[in-house]
Image (cartoon, rainbow, N blue to C red):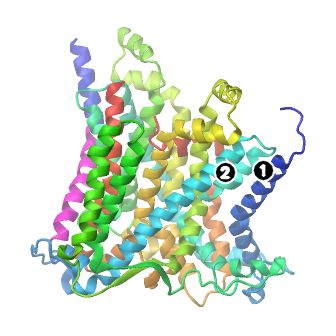
Amino acid sequence: MREASRDKLKAFLTLLPSMILIGVFVYGFIGNTIWTSMTDWGGMGALALEPEKNFIGLENYIDLFTGFLGGGFRQDLVNAVYYSVLLLAGAVGLGMFIAILLDQKPRGEDVLRTIFLYPMSLSFIVSGTIWRWLLAPQGGVNVLPTYFGFKPLTFSWLSSQSATLVFNWQDLLRILIYIAAFVLILVGLFLLRKDQGRAIKRWLVPGILLGAFVWLFGGIIPDALFMEEEHGFNLATLGIIMATIWQYSGYTMALYLAGFNGISQDLRDAAMLDGASQFGYYRFVAIPMLKPITISAVIILSHISLKMFDLIFAMTGPDNAETGHPALTMYLTTFRANDFARGAAIAIVLFLIAAMFIVPYLVGQYRQRGRR
Amino acid sequence: MTTRKITPGSVLLYATLVVLALFFLMPAYMAAVTALKMPADISLPTAWEWPDVVNWASFSEAIGLLRPNFINSIILTLCATAGSTILGSLNGYVFSKWKFKGSDVVFTLFLFGMFIPYQVILIPLFQTLRSMHLYGGLPGLILAHIVYGLPITSLIFRNFYAQIPTALIESARLDGAGFFSIYLRIVFPLSIPGFVVTSLWQFTQIWNEFLWGICLTRHADNPITVGLAQLAGGQAVSWNLPMAGSIMAAMPVLAIYIFLGRYFIRGLLAGSVKE
């Protein structure tokens, strides 16, 4: 018995150094960054060994979201949202599509799998450098159609100034409430077949009420900004999105392929005997079964898209405002402009967005472990 | 399914796969073609054409320019990979076979460190390394990679050790083996594949990392990714050099991927927290 408890102590002591390291380097540092974001650390003496820092509360955040000089950051944030959504749709969609194709066991499957997955092994700096050359205005992708007898494309991939889906930042609060209402209604419709009463009471009615409220009385909701400020989906970010999808759809393909292979042949045969078509098999059997994989892929891709820095740095350099991203702005603000407090505030905004996905996911995983 | 007939479906399948494969190979082809051209022959409209004269000089020039970065990256990657996998293995052993009250919570708290955007710890990391006199050189960067590698290495080893039957550990304990002798005599010898998977994953991640490389090291200690970014960042440079540099920077991980692809993919899947 004494031997056993000594072993338990040894086990704990083995883990202790890592616990301290993670405690300090992850949680301590996050706390430190939160504190830094509430100071005015920056400017001339920022790099001094004992820099002057004064507590100023949430001023940095207020400035980022509503301040006169925060417009660039707000555009970066909008870029990041579009970037994440399109990356998720593109990489999950294309990855799943390729996995289904390879699941038909074509000849040369091994070679094809190798081809689809190799971008994943590359550094973002490497792929960014190559894609920048591929997306050069009068070359690369734009001249490809000439080899098939068409005119060359004239799209300026990384430098386009046009934006679509433009909205006014003043309306941000209203738009956010509309989105919340939309999500509520969507979830409600989704649950309608399963539990009608709850779906209507908990989701549909509040969603419709919320939407109607903003529509009718939207005027009393305060403007987020005192002047008009337009933000939209910058077409210049399309090239970056394409490069990221190229790099990461092989990864989702590998995840789904592993999942498809894990489904027993019996189940597949049974579905076929029941008259399911190939399409029906994936639509109603295989893909629903792989929901945990889809969730993992979404979590991993969204956190990658939120910290996306190297690829954008390599593709457009630090100076292209059209393709800005908070992760890149954070680096430039902190280490180029020495504005540490503002950089910290940007980092915390990114962190909070990431935590929205990750904390529920990790809690879910933890509960699952507890059940076993 | 042994005899394959040509059906419209299979034609469509293969045609789609070929088009997709070409799309995925396009950047690799472009990099190779541009790196092999004479600098004077590189022009935007003819970017896709194979060079008339194959010119290998760009590679030797790129090697000359990036050699210090390459050596830095090798030292960095080997040290940080070794450190994080050994610690991760011990952690995984505790997390899977020596659970104590609250160890699952600790494990979840570890995993969180894997998903944070690293920007959120960058400023205190920079400050801490500076006050430890580790800022600017390789040791500080190695330390950072070891610490932030712990979540993923602990996760992979924990899942790997979960496959070792607990009965094996129990019977060793009945025979009088303690915590460390069980690890050294039973668990460690069984974990060679786990070490391969984890080291390959860490090697790839650390080799490819850029943010800490650029924020935490001085010029002389820049890893290869930072060296390549500087080589490619200048506007006046002709494109053969960055392309040759890209190929050079990609080579070690591409080689791992091509020759040890099975382990690479297992690391990839293990990193998805799927249990």
| Residue A35 belongs to the span the image colors magenta | yes
Instruction: Identify the secondary structure beneath mark 2.
Output: helix
Residue at point 15%, 70% (across, down): A38
**Mark 2 or 1, closer to the camera:** 1
For label 1, the residue is B13
Chain for numbered disc 1: B
Nearer to me, A176 or A325: A176
The answer to if A267 sits in the magenta stretch is: no
Q: Say left or right for A69 vs A256.
A: left
What percent of the width, then of the height, locates residue B120?
30, 63
In 3D space, how far apart are the residues under numbered discs 2 and 1 (Cα atoms)?
10 Å
Q: Name which residue lies at 55% across and 63% down.
A: A123
Q: Quadrant of residue B57?
A: bottom right
Judge left or right: residue B249 versus residue A61. Answer: right
The reply to whether residue B17 is in sight is yes
Q: Is residue A282 above or below residue B25?
A: above
Q: Which of the 4 quarters of the picture holds residue A180?
A: bottom left
Q: Mark 2, residues whose alpha carbon is within 10 Å: few (<14), some, or many (≥20)?
A: many
Identify the disc placed on residue A98: 2
Tags 2 and 1 both on a single chain = no
Spot occupied by residue B89 in the image (x, y as percentages of width and height): 42, 36
What residue is shown at x 48% (from left), y 69% (from top)?
A310
Q: In this picture, which residue range is highlighted in magenta?
A: A16-38
Residue type marked 2: Ile
